[in-house]
Image (cartoon, rainbow, N blue to C red):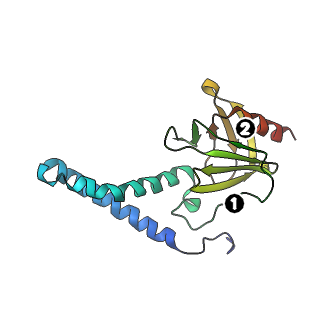
Amino acid sequence: MVSSEQLKPDRRYFYYRIYCIITVIGWFLLFPLVIHHKNYLWLLPSIAPFTFPAAIMTCSWSVYPLKYSIFGPLKRTPCPNEPLILEGKNSWSSVGMFNMNGFFSFSMLIFSSGIGISFSGTSEVFIPKEYFLAVKKSFWGYYQLKHRSPEIRSPLGFSNKEAFEKIQLMLKN
C-alpha cells in the first residue's frame, strides 16, 4: 500500500498523459498529410512547439519506471539535507538503456548516505547506498553503477572518475 506522503500532491500527471497522447496522434496524423500535400508545410513548424515537450516527457519514461515518471502518481525521494561530498558532472551518461549523450546528461550528487541524480536541474532522485549492488569500470573509461532502487532504472552509466572512486569507497564501508 502506498502512503499519502509518497503520492504527488496533485493529479497533473494524468493531464500529462493526455497531452502526450494527443500530441503523438496529432503528429502522426499531420506528418503524412504534410509530406503528401506540400502546401501544408507550414503546419510542421506550428506543431513543433507541442511535440518537443511531449518528446521530453516521453524520455522521462525511459529513465524512471512509469509510476515514478512524469506520468506516474508517486514522488521520487529527494536528496537529503546533509553536506555534499562531491558534485560530479558527466560528459556522458546513461540510465538503463537510455543513452544521454550531448543534450541530456545528469550530475551525480554524492552524499555520505548515497547519491543524488540531478537531470539538468529539472528532476532529481536519491539512491541510498543500501541499494547499491556494484560499481565497475565499463568500456572506454566509462563507469557503471548497478542498483536496486525502484525509483530509477538500472544501471547508471557515467564518465566522472572522482564519482566512481567515491562510490567504490561507499561500497567498501
Q: Amino acid at mark 1?
A: Pro
Q: Nearer the viewer, residue 86 or 62?
A: 86
Whether residue 150 is visible to the viewer of this picture, yes or no, is no
Whether residue 158 is visible to the viewer of this picture, yes or no, is yes
Horizontal and vertical percent position of residue 69: 55, 59
The disc at residue 163 is: 2
Horizontal and vertical percent position of residue 80: 76, 58
Horizontal and vertical percent position of residue 154: 63, 45
Residue at position x 80%, y 53% from top? 83
Residue 167, quarter of picture: top right
- SS at mark 1? loop
Horizontal and vertical percent position of residue 107: 64, 45
Give the position of the N terminus as an image quadrant: bottom right
- Looking at the image, residue 28 sits to the left or right of residue 94; the answer is left
Q: Amino acid at mark 2?
A: Ala
Mark earlier in primary sequence (2, 1)? 1
Residue at position x 73%, y 34% from top? 162
- SS at mark 2? helix
Dot 2, how many residues are within 10 Å of its Cα: few (below 14), some (14-19), or many (20+)? many
Q: Which residue is mark 1?
A: 78
Contact (CB < 8 A) between labels 2 and 1? no
